[in-house]
Image (cartoon, rainbow, N blue to C red):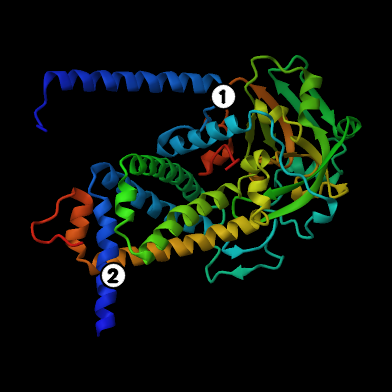
């Protein structure tokens, strides 16, 4: 019982700190854009995956060669995933440019430092991994699939073990990020979804519901 | 801080908006002049296409070359997407081993010409072992042998007005390359694959190879090459058949 209460408090704390960051208007706006672009990347990425839901390791892979994993999904969007590709690359630009604004603003206003100090070890670790490992790895493995980019910097793809390895890594890092977002939303819900969501979108907290 | 709209604030906002708009217009004109805007730049997705194309063109300004591999890396499986053209003209040429096939090269060139397969094979041949990825997600490595597109362009004498090279196969699809890709040393007109004649499914008798872009830019079953200064008059004016069926013109991704 005591342990459950501790977990609940931890959840409130995580959600509280995350949402607290959003009090500055620019932070709220960039968080909103990030949420929308992440969702667009997820949906369009899934559409692209449905053109060939098989994952390989190394440089090459195709039907007729051994796969790493055959995902339990149908090949339904073969030759039909053009919209997914247009949306994916547009959202990737939005996500990255928005992320740059978020990071620069956060560093300049010492937003990160102030809030980082209020985090516990688990929160700090999660935050560091998401921001400095998962997001960069997402962009890196994405660029490693581009024949134009790898013509300029071949090391981008060879370090990952090949173009198909990059595609597989892109898929697995997505899965981890989706897990993070689910936990993130779950914790916000535990801390009182309505007031937190209202806070996130308007910056306004009803008197007496402040949680830290 | 008051929320009252003062005259000063209104004027400042107006000036900033005007400066921003003219800045954007100047940037767009500069980008167009330096070939940083793709032909399918319209609509909301066109914003992403333009950013990608411009960024990659600037990154590749120093003529980067696609990765090349060893013969031992050649894939045992090289899948084929789509069937050969079902036109009567193609089937007739195929049945006679392309003896009467000729590649027409015209448009903004000093000497419009046509080449037989034997004539192309007498030009300096080049080979490359390169990676080819399909937009669907699969990929393979193969050796391609052919003549550099730049050698053929030099033979016919390309006008200084040239901005794109358009490629027409025996079916309804068509595509185009900008001049940096057209002159690129790895851009081949390939008649051989893995030491053999180019197999029918891979685009016999002649296909394009553009290893710095996804597989669908490497047009198969070539019939005609046209040098142009604008793509507006071809098809729906979007630069290739791909945007007409929902895929981007530029595929460096």
Q: Which residue is mark 2?
A: A10
Q: Position of residue A80 (x, y in %)?
A: 52, 53
Chain where mark 1 sits: B
Question: Compared to B17, does A157 lie above or below?
Answer: below
Which of the labelled discs sits on residue B147, or is there none? none
- Label 2 with label 1: CB-CB less than 8 Å: no
Q: Is residue A204 left or right of residue A43?
A: left
Q: Which mark is residue B35?
A: 1
Q: Position of residue A33 (x, y in %)?
A: 33, 46
Whether residue A182 is visible: no
x and y, in percent, of residue B116 in the image: 85, 31
Task: Give the chain letter at badge 2.
Answer: A
Instruction: Tell whether B96 sits left or right of A4.
Output: right
Outermost residue, front side: A117
Question: On the rendered image, what quadrant is the C terminus of chain B found in?
Answer: top right
Q: Residue at x 59, y 54 (%)?
A: B136
Task: Please provide percent x and percent y for residue B78.
Answer: 75, 56
Q: Give the quarter of the image for residue B112.
A: top right
Name the outermost residue toward the bottom.
A1
């Amino acid at each position: 019982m005591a342990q459950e209460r501790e977990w609940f408090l931890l959840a409130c704390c995580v959600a509280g700190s995350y949402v607290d960051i959003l009090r500055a208007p620019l932070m709220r706006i960039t968080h909103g854009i990030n949420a929308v672009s992440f969702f667009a990347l997820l949906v369009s990425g899934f559409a692209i995956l449905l053109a060939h839901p098989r994952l390989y390791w190394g440089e090459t892979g195709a039907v007729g060669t051994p796969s790493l994993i055959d995902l339990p999904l149908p090949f339904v969007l073969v030759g039909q995933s053009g919209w997914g590709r247009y949306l994916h690359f547009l959202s990737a630009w939005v996500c990255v440019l928005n992320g740059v604004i978020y990071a620069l603003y956060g560093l300049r206003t010492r937003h990160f430092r102030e809030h980082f100090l209020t985090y516990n070890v688990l929160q700090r670790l999660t935050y560091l991994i998401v921001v400095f490992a998962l997001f960069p790895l997402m962009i890196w493995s994405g660029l490693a699939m581009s024949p134009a980019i790898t013509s300029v910097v071949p090391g981008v793809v060879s370090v990952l073990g090949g173009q198909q390895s990059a595609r597989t890594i892109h898929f697995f890092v997505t899965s981890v990020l989706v897990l993070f977002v689910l936990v993130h939303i779950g914790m916000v819900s535990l801390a009182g979804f309505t007031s937190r969501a209202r806070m996130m979108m308007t910056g306004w907290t009803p008197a007496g519901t402040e949680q830290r | 801080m008051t929320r009252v709209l003062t005259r000063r604030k209104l004027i400042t906002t107006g000036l900033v908006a005007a400066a921003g708009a003219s800045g954007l217009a100047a940037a767009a004109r500069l980008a167009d002049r330096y070939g940083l805007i793709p032909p399918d730049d319209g609509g909301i997705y066109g914003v992403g296409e333009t950013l990608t194309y411009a960024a990659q063109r600037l990154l590749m300004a120093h003529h980067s070359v696609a990765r090349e591999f060893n013969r031992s890396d050649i894939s045992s499986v090289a899948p084929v997407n789509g069937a050969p053209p079902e036109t009567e003209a193609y089937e007739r040429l195929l049945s006679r081993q392309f003896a009467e096939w000729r590649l027409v090269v015209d448009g903004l060139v000093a000497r419009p010409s046509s080449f037989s397969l034997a004539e192309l094979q007498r030009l300096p041949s080049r080979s490359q072992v390169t990676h080819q990825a399909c937009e669907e997600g699969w990929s393979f490595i193969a050796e391609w042998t052919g003549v550099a597109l730049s050698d053929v362009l030099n033979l016919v004498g390309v006008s200084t007005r040239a901005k794109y090279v358009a490629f027409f196969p025996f079916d309804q699809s068509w595509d185009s390359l900008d001049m940096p890709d057209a002159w690129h040393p790895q851009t081949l007109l390939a008649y051989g694959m893995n030491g053999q004649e180019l197999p029918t499914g891979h685009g016999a008798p002649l296909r394009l190879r553009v290893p710095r872009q996804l597989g669908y830019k490497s047009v198969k079953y070539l019939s005609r090459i046209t040098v142009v200064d604008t793509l507006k008059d071809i098809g729906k004016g979007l630069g290739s058949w791909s945007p007409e069926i929902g895929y981007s013109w530029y595929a460096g991704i």
